[in-house]
C-alpha cells in the first residue's frame, strides 16, 4: 500500500480575517501553520509522495513557510475556487505519482499526529475504501433562526468530521471527477463525495487535538498552546517526616550514620531526611508517597536502609520522563550536630540520585528547645525536590 498525501492549502481563510494574509501562512509557535501540518506528514514513516495544493498568489508565501523542511518529496499544484476543486487538482497530481491510496488533509489542521495517521492507515490496510476520522458530537444541538430556537436536535449518531479523510485513490478520484462532470460543486468534504458515489465510509476515532483553524481565535489559541508546550515542564514536590527518638547509639540522617546517645524509632532505619526527600520526588510526578511504595506493614522493609526508598523514587521519576534538578533537605533536630556531616550527606544523596553534589543541599536547624523536637523526643525533616519533565502531555 502506497499512501499519497494531498494537503489542501489554497483557501483564503475569510473567516479567520484575511487582513493578516491566509491563515495557513500565519505563524503559530514560531512557524507557519502549513509548516506544522506538512511536518506531521514528513515525519510519518508511511507517507508516500506529498502534494500541497496552493493558491496561485501564494507561491512565495509557501516557499518561505516551508524553507526549513526537507521537502524533496513534496510537490505543489494550483488549487481552485472551492475546497472541492482544490482537492480534485491534488488528487490528479498524486495519481501521476506512486500511490494506491490517498489521505486528503486540510492545511489548516496543524495538530494531526502519528497516532491518528496510524489508526486510519490500519483501516485502509484492512481493505476499507474510505475512512473518516471523526468524533461524536458532545454539545446539545439546536436549530434556530433569527435569534430564536426552533428545535433541539438529537446528537445521537452525529459525528464531527475531521481530516485526513482517506481513500483508495482510484475510488475517490473517480468519484470527484464524476461529481465535477455533473456540476455537483456543493460538497464540503471528501467523504460526502464518497457517500454520494455510494462508497461505504468507515468511521475511525478522530483526535480532539486535530482541530481546524477556522476563526481568528483558533489561531491565537493554537499559538498559545504551542508556546506553552515549548516552556520547560518544571515541577516541585515537597515532603515532611518525623520519627521518635529513644535511647540508643546513633541516628542515620540523609544516609549518614552519626553516633549519638539516642536512635530514631521506625520500621526501616528511620532516616527522616531521606524519607522526606523520597516523598518530595514522588510528588513531582503524582506517584503517591513512600507508604504506597514501601508499606510499613511489609516485613521486607524492616530495618531497611532508606537509600533503597530514595533510589526507587528517583527511578520512578525517570520512568516518567523526569530529570532531577535539585534536592533540598532541612533537618530539624536539637542534637546531634549536623554541620560536620553535611558535606557527606550531600555526597551520599547525590550518589543515590545520580546527580551532581551541587544539586543536593542539606540544612539544619534546632527547634529552639520548644515542642517535641526541642524536648529531644523526635527529629523532623522537610524536603523539596525540583524535577524537569519532558514528553508528558499537559
Ligand atoms: N478553494 C479552497 C478552499 C479551501 N481550501 C483549503 O481547505 C481547507 C479547509 O477549508 P476552510 O477551513 O474552509 O479554509 P478556507 O476556505 O481558507 O476558509 P474560509 O472558508 O474561512 O475562507 C483549508 O486548509 C483551505 O486552505 C483550498 O485548498 N481551496
Ligand atoms: C473537510 C472539513 O475540514 C471536515 O471537517 C470541513 O468540511 C472543511 O470545510 P468547512 O467549510 O470549514 O466545514
Image: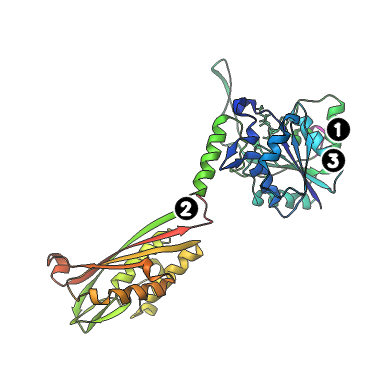
Q: Is residue 315 magenta?
A: no
Q: Which residue is mark 3?
A: 171
Residue 234 versus residue 263 in the image, above or below: above
Looking at the image, tell me whether mark 1 or mark 2 is earlier in sequence order.
1
Task: Identify the residue under disc 2.
Answer: 232
How crowded pointer 3 is (Cα within 10 Å; few <14, some 14-19, many 20+) is rated as: some
**Residue positioned 42% across, 71% down in the render:** 353
- In depth, the one of 342 and 331 nearer the eye is 342
Tell me the CA gap for discs 1 and 3: 10 Å
Report helix, strand or loop for mark 3. Answer: helix
**Seen from this angle, which residue lies furthest top?**
146
Task: List the residue tagged with mark 1.
Answer: 177
Q: Nearer the viewer, mark 1 or mark 3?
A: 1
Find residue 76 and report its image quarter.
Answer: top right
Within the displayed image, which quadrant is ligand 1 positioned in?
top right
* Residue shown at the point (62%, 26%) measured from the top left: 18
Tell me residue 230's x, y (percent). Answer: 51, 49
Residue 91, position as x, y percentages in the image:
81, 38
Do residues under tags 1 and 3 come within 8 Å of each other at their CB atoms?
A: no
- Compare marks 3 and 2 and give the one earlier in the sequence: 3
Total residue callouts: 3
Q: Is residue 308 left or right of residue 119?
A: left
CA separation in Å, label 1 and label 2: 49 Å
What range of the chain is rendered magenta?
Answer: 195-199
Amino acid at each position: 500500500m502506497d499512501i499519497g498525501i494531498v494537503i489542501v492549502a489554497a483557501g483564503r481563510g475569510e473567516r479567520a480575517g484575511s487582513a493578516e494574509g491566509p491563515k495557513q501562512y500565519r505563524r503559530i509557535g514560531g512557524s507557519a501553520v502549513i509548516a506544522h501540518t506538512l511536518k506531521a506528514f514528513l515525519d510519518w514513516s508511511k507517507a508516500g509522495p506529498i502534494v500541497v495544493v496552493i493558491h496561485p498568489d501564494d507561491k512565495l508565501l509557501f516557499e518561505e513557510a516551508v524553507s526549513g523542511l526537507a521537502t524533496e518529496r513534496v510537490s505543489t499544484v494550483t488549487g481552485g475556487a472551492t475546497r472541492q476543486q482544490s482537492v480534485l487538482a491534488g488528487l490528479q497530481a498524486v495519481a501521476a505519482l506512486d500511490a494506491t491510496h490517498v489521505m486528503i488533509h486540510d492545511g489548516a489542521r496543524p495538530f494531526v499526529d502519528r497516532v491518528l495517521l496510524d489508526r486510519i492507515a490500519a483501516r485502509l490496510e484492512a481493505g476499507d475504501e474510505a475512512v473518516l476520522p471523526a468524533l461524536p458530537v458532545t454539545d446539545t444541538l439546536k436549530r434556530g433562526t433569527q435569534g430564536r430556537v426552533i428545535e433541539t436536535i438529537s446528537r445521537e449518531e452525529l459525528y464531527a468530521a475531521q481530516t485526513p479523510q482517506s481513500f483508495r485513490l482510484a475510488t475517490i478520484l473517480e468519484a470527484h471527477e464524476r461529481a465535477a462532470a455533473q456540476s455537483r460543486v456543493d460538497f464540503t468534504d471528501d467523504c460526502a463525495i464518497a457517500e454520494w458515489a455510494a462508497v461505504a465510509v468507515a468511521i475511525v476515532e478522530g483526535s480532539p487535538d486535530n482541530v481546524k483553524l477556522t476563526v481568528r481565535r483558533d489561531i491565537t489559541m493554537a499559538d498559545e498552546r504551542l508556546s506553552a508546550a515549548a516552556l520547560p515542564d518544571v515541577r516541585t514536590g515537597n515532603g515532611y517526616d518525623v520519627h521518635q527518638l529513644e535511647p540508643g547509639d546513633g541516628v542515620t540522617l540523609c544516609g549518614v550514620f552519626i553516633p549519638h546517645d539516642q536512635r530514631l524509632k521506625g520500621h526501616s532505619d528511620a532516616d527522616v531526611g531521606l524519607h522526606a526527600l523520597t516523598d518530595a520526588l514522588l510528588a513531582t510526578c503524582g506517584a503517591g508517597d513512600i507508604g504506597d511504595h514501601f508499606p510499613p506493614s511489609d516485613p521486607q522493609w524492616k530495618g531497611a536502609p532508606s537509600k533503597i526508598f530514595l533510589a526507587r523514587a528517583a527511578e520512578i521519576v525517570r520512568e516518567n520522563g523526569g530529570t532531577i534538578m535539585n534536592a533540598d533537605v532541612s533537618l530539624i533536630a536539637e542534637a546531634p550536630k549536623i554541620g560536620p556531616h553535611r558535606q557527606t550527606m550531600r555526597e551520599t544523596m547525590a550518589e543515590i540520585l545520580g546527580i551532581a553534589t551541587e544539586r543536593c543541599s542539606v540544612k539544619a536547624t534546632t527547634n529552639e528547645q520548644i515542642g517535641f523536637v526541642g524536648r529531644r523526643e523526635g527529629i523532623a525533616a522537610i524536603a523539596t525536590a525540583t524535577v524537569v519533565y519532558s514528553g508528558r502531555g499537559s
